[in-house]
Structure formats: structure tokens, C-alpha cells
Amino acid sequence: MLESAILLCGSVIGLALLLNLWRLLKGPSLQDRILALDTMYINAIALILLLGMHMGSPLYYEGALLIALLGFISTVAVAKYLLRGDIIE
């Protein structure tokens, strides 16, 4: 039962990744593209966590945490660049 739930969740998150890729490529504005990229890394974290559940290895959880930290920092940096035009003051 758990294996079929993981497969179903993985396929839905994979579909969400494809839709985010479409928004990233066809987004009407730069803000839409940044939001799509931010959502893509969140979906990638979810896929890595599902893979960790499937494999039963805690190493995947640490990788997902690392990607979450890097994604947050990159989102803050891009938002600051869009607001001020400069990242480091």
C-alpha cells in the first residue's frame, strides 16, 4: 500500500515539475519565472523525500535539507536583486 502511494505521489509531483518547467519557459514576466523556479526546487525536495522513503535511507533527507537551504538563499538573493539592482550593499 505504501509503495503504491509513493508511486502516485511521485507521478503527481513529476507532473507538477513539468508544469513548472512550462511556466519557467513561457512565463509572461520575470517574477512568474522566479516563482516557477522557486516552486520547482520545492517539488524537487518533495521528490527526494519520496525517494528517501522508498529506499529507506536517511541520506536523502540530508540532501533535501541542503537543497532547501540553498533554494531559500537563492530566492532571497534574486528578490533583493530585483528590488535594488544590487545583491551586496
Image (cartoon, helix red, strand yellow):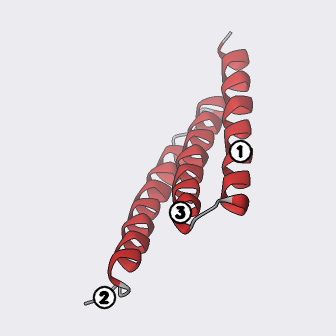
Amino acid on which the number 2 mark rests in the picture: Ile
Q: How busy is the neighbourhood of tag 1: few (under 14 within 10 Å), some, or many (20 plus)? A: some
**Residue annotated with mark 1:** 19
Q: How busy is the neighbourhood of tag 2: few (under 14 within 10 Å), some, or many (20 plus)? A: few
Residue 66 percent location from the top left of the image: 46, 58
- Compared with 31, 81 (above or below) is below
**Residue annotated with mark 2:** 88
- Mark number, residue 32: none
Residue 27 percent location from the top left of the image: 65, 59
Q: Please state, as top left, top right, bottom left or bottom right, where the C terminus lies in the image.
A: bottom left
Q: Earlier in the sequence, mark 1 or mark 2?
A: 1
- Compared with 23, 51 (above or below) is above
- Residue in the foreground of this view, choosing between 68 and 29: 29
- Compared with 51, 85 (above or below) is below
Residue 13 percent location from the top left of the image: 66, 36
Residue 77 percent location from the top left of the image: 39, 74
Distance of label 3 from label 2 (alpha carbons) = 20 Å
Q: Earlier in the sequence, mark 3 or mark 2?
A: 3
Amino acid on which the number 3 mark rests in the picture: Ile
Quarter of image, res 87: bottom left
Q: Earlier in the sequence, mark 3 or mark 1?
A: 1
Seen as rendered, the residue at the extreme left is: 89
**Callout 1 secondary element:** helix
Q: How busy is the neighbourhood of tag 3: few (under 14 within 10 Å), some, or many (20 plus)? A: some
